């Protein structure tokens, strides 16, 4: 087989399509950011972006939802594309964009093998106690009502990278780690021995932490009350919970940088948004620690996790009872991937850049060996 020296990683998000080419050392040799494609696009923009990359030996696609069927990466052949499409109702906002990107890139590179890499797959290992909702058995038997979890590609990468930084086996054996992916979307994963055992997102990416525009966990009775007593339709509720809640609902913006600046100036709404965000974050880290039976390392990643020293410091202030502390100087500046805790702290605290592209390329090599 040919050596996979050029892997094209395709990451279709809600507002952009990120194309990255990684060589066999995981160095980026080509990149382009485009508007997300829509179903039926002719692929001309993608073709123009890909042509300067030169020869591509394989393609890895980020797919948000793998349902119960896909618990790991899979070669896209036969009926795989159709089976992925059949899961669209589980992720109606995300899956169509992933499929449109898959179709457009396949049109441009029809003879290049492609692999689907799923954001839900990393969490396929969480035990039944963590995955099962306490709902009627008839419902659970009829529909796939379980905690799927998301951001799995990011959590998988940072757990592997953390093990490397800490000098632990690459499998993460013996390491109890909470990964905090804090971006516009946000979730935690409890990772033991390199495997996810719990996570904060649930059946959908709406569950869990407060996010930029998503509510995070809300009492389902509150949602039912808004439907039955306030007369708010299901589609309006869905739009509000997805796009007009979270930090935006609390402070009028989903931009954490703006919120922290306003809070520092005494803005009451921004202060409340910051404190609600941190309250939910610290409580969820403690819950993930309980799932692990202890904590060896806490990792921050994602746009907020990587760039906001204040959020990391304030979160650590709430987690001292778990042995989480940060060194102000190391927290403030340093290498991209680093330990920010004092040397004698019982729990290591790390900042690691989100590199889903590296994890996707790794999974491609797993499916299409050189």
Image: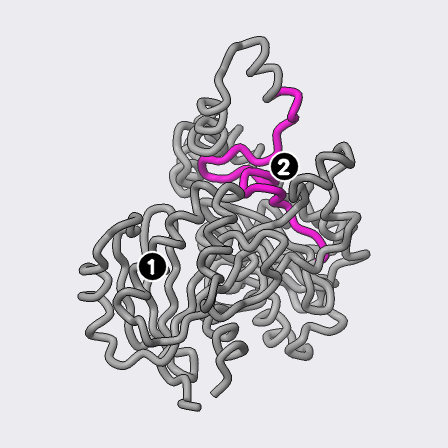
The residue furthest top is 229
Foreground pick, 58 / 194: 58
Label drawn at residue 279: 2
Pointers 1 and 2 in contact (C-beta within 8 Å): no
**Residue at the spot 54% in from the left edge and 67% down from the top edge:** 73
Which image quadrant for residue 298?
bottom right
Left/right placement of residue 337 relative to residue 7 reads right
**Residue 368: within the magenta?**
no
Tally of marks: 2
> Circle 1 — which element?
helix
Judged by depth in the image, the label closer to the viewer, 1 or 2, is 1
Foreground pick, 135 / 236: 135
Cα gap from disc 1 to disc 2, whole angstroms: 42 Å
Q: Which residues are magenta?
A: 197-222
> Circle 2 — which element?
helix
**Residue at the spot 59% in from the left edge and 12% down from the top edge:** 228
Above or below, 325 against 231 in this view is below
Residue 248 rendering spot, x and y as whole percentages:
43, 31
Above or below, 229 against 13 in this view is above
Residue matched to label 1: 103
Label 1, residues with CA under 10 Å away: few <14, some 14-19, many ≥20: many
Residue 41 rendering spot, x and y as whole percentages:
24, 52
Residue 335 visible here: no
Check the picture and name the quadrant holding the N terminus.
Answer: bottom left
Above or below, 225 against 352 in this view is above
Residue 260 rendering spot, x and y as whole percentages:
44, 39
The residue furthest front is 78
**Residue at the spot 64% in from the left edge and 57% down from the top edge:** 123
Left/right placement of residue 98 relative to residue 122 reads left
Residue 137 rendering spot, x and y as whole percentages:
78, 36
């Amino acid at each position: 087989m040919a050596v996979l020296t050029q892997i094209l990683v395709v990451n279709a998000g809600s507002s952009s399509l990120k194309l990255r080419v990684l060589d066999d050392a995981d160095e980026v040799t080509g990149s382009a950011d485009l508007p997300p494609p829509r179903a039926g696009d002719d692929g001309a923009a993608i073709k123009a972006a890909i042509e300067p990359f030169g020869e591509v030996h394989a393609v890895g696609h980020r797919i948000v939802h793998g349902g119960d069927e896909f618990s790991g990466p899979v070669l896209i052949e036969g009926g795989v594309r159709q089976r992925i499409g059949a899961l669209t109702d589980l992720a109606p906002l995300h899956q169509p964009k992933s499929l449109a990107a898959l179709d457009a890139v396949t049109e441009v590179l029809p003879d290049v093998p492609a692999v689907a890499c799923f954001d839900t797959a990393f969490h396929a290992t969480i035990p039944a106690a963590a995955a099962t909702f306490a709902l009627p058995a008839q419902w659970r038997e009829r529909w796939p009502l379980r905690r799927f979890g998301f951001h799995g590609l990011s959590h998988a990468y940072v757990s592997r990278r953390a093990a490397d930084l800490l000098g632990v086996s690459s499998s993460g054996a013996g390491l109890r780690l909470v990964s905090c992916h804090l971006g516009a979307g946000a979730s935690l994963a409890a990772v033991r021995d390199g495997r996810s055992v719990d996570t904060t997102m649930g059946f959908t990416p709406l569950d869990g932490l407060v996010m930029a525009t998503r509510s995070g966990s809300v009492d389902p009775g509150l949602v039912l009350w808004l439907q039955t007593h306030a007369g708010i339709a299901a589609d309006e509720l869905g739009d509000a919970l997805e796009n007009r809640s979270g930090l935006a609902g609390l402070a009028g913006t989903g931009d954490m940088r703006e919120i922290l600046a306003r809070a520092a100036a005494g803005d009451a709404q921004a202060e409340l948004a910051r404190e609600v965000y941190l309250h939910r974050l610290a409580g969820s880290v403690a819950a993930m620690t309980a799932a692990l039976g202890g904590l060896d390392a806490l990792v921050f990643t994602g746009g907020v996790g990587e760039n906001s020293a204040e959020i990391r410091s304030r979160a650590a202030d709430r987690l001292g009872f778990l042995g989480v502390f940060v060194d102000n100087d190391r927290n403030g500046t340093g290498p991209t991937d680093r330990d920010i805790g004092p040397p004698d702290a019982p729990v290591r605290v790390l900042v690691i850049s989100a590199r889903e592209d590296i994890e996707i390329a790794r999974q491609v090599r797993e499916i299409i060996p050189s």
